[in-house]
Image (cartoon, rainbow, N blue to C red):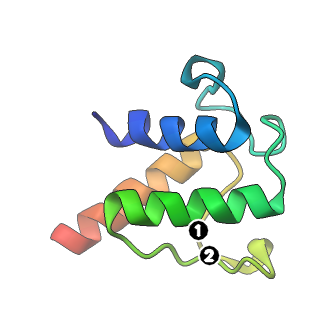
């Protein structure tokens, strides 16, 4: 399973959607994910990939981690995995 597939699976589960309903250009808001759901998604992603995402749940706009779209979340996770292994 690719990073993209796993992230989509986690986000879809949080949004109570099928993975096929989650597109890379989808935003958390467009998928119906509220702030609590987003935090839960971040925790699930951290656990799945054994990484720590620099995400401030109290002020998401202050984070260096881009959560604007599914694609940006995937790109951020791939970067964190590369930094961890490299």
Alpha carbons under labels 2 and 1: distance apart: 6 Å
- Dots 2 and 1: beta carbons under 8 Å? yes
Mark 1: give few (<14), some (14-19) or many (20+) Cα within 10 Å.
some
Going 75% across and 45% down the picture, which residue do you hit? 28
Instruction: Depth check: give the residue in front, 56 or 75.
Output: 56
Instruction: Indicate the secondary structure of the residue bearing disc 1.
Output: loop
Residue 83 at x, y = what percent?
A: 27, 71
Residue 15 falls in image quadrant: top right
Going 83% across and 35% down the picture, which residue do you hit? 30
Mark 2: give few (<14), some (14-19) or many (20+) Cα within 10 Å.
some
Residue farthest to the left? 86
Up the image or down, 13 lies above or below 35; here it is: above
Which label sits in the foreground, 2 or 1?
2
What is the count of numbered marks? Answer: 2
Residue 76 at x, y = what percent?
A: 47, 59
Residue 82 at x, y = what percent?
A: 25, 63
Which of disc 1 and disc 2 is earlier in sequence?
A: 2
Image mark for residue 55: 2
Residue 55 at x, y = what percent?
A: 62, 75
Image mark for residue 65: 1
Going 74% across and 56% down the picture, which residue do you hit? 37
Image quadrant containing the C terminus = bottom left
Instruction: Depth check: give the residue in front, 37 or 72.
Output: 37
Judged left or right of residue 18, residue 5 is left
């Amino acid at each position: 399973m690719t990073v993209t597939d796993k992230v989509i699976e986690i986000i879809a589960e949080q949004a109570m959607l099928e993975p096929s309903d989650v597109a890379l250009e989808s935003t958390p808001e467009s998928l119906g994910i509220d702030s609590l759901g987003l935090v839960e998604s971040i925790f699930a992603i951290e656990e799945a990939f054994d990484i720590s995402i620099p995400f401030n749940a109290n002020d998401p706009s202050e984070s260096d981690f881009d959560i604007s779209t599914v694609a940006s979340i995937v790109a951020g996770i791939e970067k964190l995995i590369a930094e961890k292994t490299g």
